[in-house]
Amino acid sequence: MAKKTLKKKVMKKKVQAKPAAPVVDSAREIWLAGLGAFSFAQNESVKIIDQGNKLFEKLVSEGVKLEKKTRNVAESAVGGIKGEVESTVGAVRKQAVDNWDKLETIFENRVARVLGQLGVPTAEDVNKLSARVQTLATKVTSMTQTAKPVAKKPAAKKPAAKKATAKKPVAKKAATKKPVAKKAAAKKPAAK
């Protein structure tokens, strides 16, 4: 029986040795496949990088085209909006100017009414009065020019005599004013 147990043990070892060999072989094959993949990747990477660069350049050129299109669309949209905003601003500005003019007119009317109630003449009243004064001044000038040649000859001698007598009372008035000032000066020291 010893022989039979020994044989079983040896057989077990052989059986055990056989399953390990396929695992080692599988692991080796996996390792070799990995090395092959790495080598393939290195060889193909140059091609892939080349294709990647071409793809990148193509994407950049497409991006430039798209940017131009979107910029044109955006500029046209902004131009349209800008036109609308400018027209709206113009309308609002015109309305503001009109409202300001109305407010100014209302203010001027109220101020004119208050000044009228106070009796202050308006610019129109002053202009009318100025025109009347100018008309009267021209009439007076024309009347004095026509009357001067006739009145000058006899009246020229009489005013000269009146002027000489008129100067004497002026001198008397000046003399009377001086003593009054002296009296005021004399009173001041007495008050102290």
Image: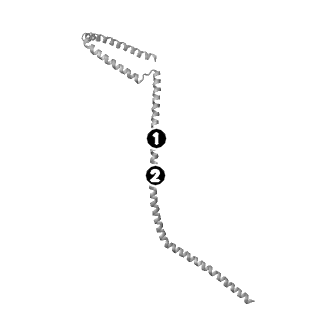
The image shows residue 57 at horizontal and vertical percentages of: 45, 63
Identify the residue under disc 2: 73
Residue located beneath label 1 in the image: 89
Q: Which residue corresponds to the image point at 31% horizontal and 11% vertical from the top-left?
A: 166
How many labels sit on residues? Answer: 2
Report x, y in % for residue 184.
41, 15
Q: Which-is-in-front pick, marks 1 and 2? A: 2
| Residue 132 shown left or right of residue 87 in the figure | left
Is 66 in front, or is 100? Answer: 66
Three-letter amino acid code at the position of disc 1: Val
**Residue at x 45%, y 22% (from the top left corner):** 116
Image-quadrant location for residue 61 = bottom left
Work out how far the residue at label 1 is from the one at label 2, CA to CA, in angstroms.
24 Å
- Between disc 1 and disc 2, whose residue precedes? 2
Q: Which residues are magenta?
A: 87-91
Residue 156 is situated, as x and y percent measured from the top left of the image, at 25, 11
Q: Measured along the vertical axis of the image, is residue 27 above or below residue 1? A: above
Tell me which amino acid carries mark 2. Answer: Val
Q: Local crowd at mark 1 within 10 Å, few (<14), some, or many (≥20)?
A: few
Q: Which SS class for mark 1? A: helix
Task: Give percent across and percent down for residue 12.
Answer: 69, 84
Residue sitting at 33 percent across and 19 percent down? Answer: 135
Magenta: main secondary structure equals helix
- Does 79 sit above or below residue 135? below
Q: Residue at x 47, y 63 (%)?
A: 56
**Which corner quadrant holds the N terminus?**
bottom right
Give the side of residue 75 with respect to residue 35, left or right. left
